[in-house]
Image (cartoon, grey):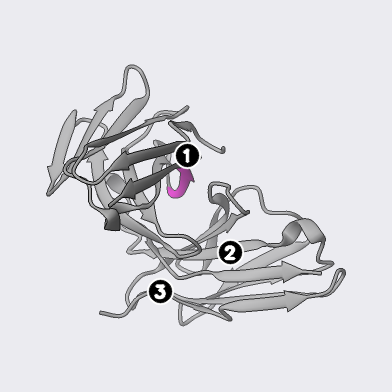
Amino acid sequence: AAGVIQSPRHLIKEKRETATLKCYPIPRHDTVYWYQQGPGQDPQFLISFYEKMQSDKGSIPDRFSAQQFSDYHSELNMSSLELGDSALYFCASSSGQGGFDEKLFFGSGTQLSVL
Amino acid sequence: SQQGEEDPQALSIQEGENATMNCSYKTSINNLQWYRQNSGRGLVHLILIRSNEREKHSGRLRVTLDTSKKSSSLLITASRAADTASYFCATDDENNFNKFYFGSGTKLNVKP
């Protein structure tokens, strides 16, 4: 079965550079979530999209932006990168039906290292 | 953590023993879910319990939920070395289906 695809798998950037992370949800999933996980930390909710519209926002810095495209894939754009942005970035998708049984399906993540 | 705390933070047991992890959360929820994460990998959904349920089983997993105490526990019976991973609970927001919060996780080490 198709899973959530994230690219790239690893990314190395310098301070103040920009980075773009991509996420391709499971087919027919219309909801995408982005999470940031620092070393030894729990995943922190950044932002979510439902049907190409932003549905909720968490602790996403103003330097970051994201969007969901017509084919439901999503991109997380990160500018003016800081050392503290080094983390594992996960994308998850769900069917967006909401309610009691909503489950998240996670990609393998993008490991971002800012030097 | 954005939502709650888990305890213990780390747990080391022998193969065959049971492992119990606890999770507390802060807001009202529709459901609580448990996820497993192998080091540096994505999270994998294990089990979901609705806010109107008190206990749920799936294979060697048993989850309980106490909404009055805003807490849940995950029991893994007859643990195996392959169960070694970090375990996170996640809760949604009763008023928002598109926001999930994770607890701080329990790192389980099962020694063969």
Q: Quadrant of residue B13?
A: top left
Amino acid at the residue labelled 3: Val
Amino acid at the residue labelled 1: Gly
Expressed as whole percent of the image width and height from the top left, the position of residue B28 reads 40, 28
* Residue on which the image places disc 1: B103
Within the magenta stretch, is there residue A7?
no
Label 2, label 1: how far apart the Cα atoms are = 17 Å
* Residue on which the image places disc 2: A89
Quadrant the N terminus of chain B occupies: top right
Nearest to the observer: residue B86 or residue A100: B86
Magenta residues? B98-103
Q: Residue at x 32, y 48 (%)?
A: B111
* Cβ atoms under marks 3 and 2 closer than 8 Å: no
Q: Chain of mark 1?
A: B
Report crowding for label 2: few under 14, some 14 to 19, many 20 or more residues within 10 A (C-alpha).
Answer: many
Q: Residue at x 32, y 47 (%)?
A: B110
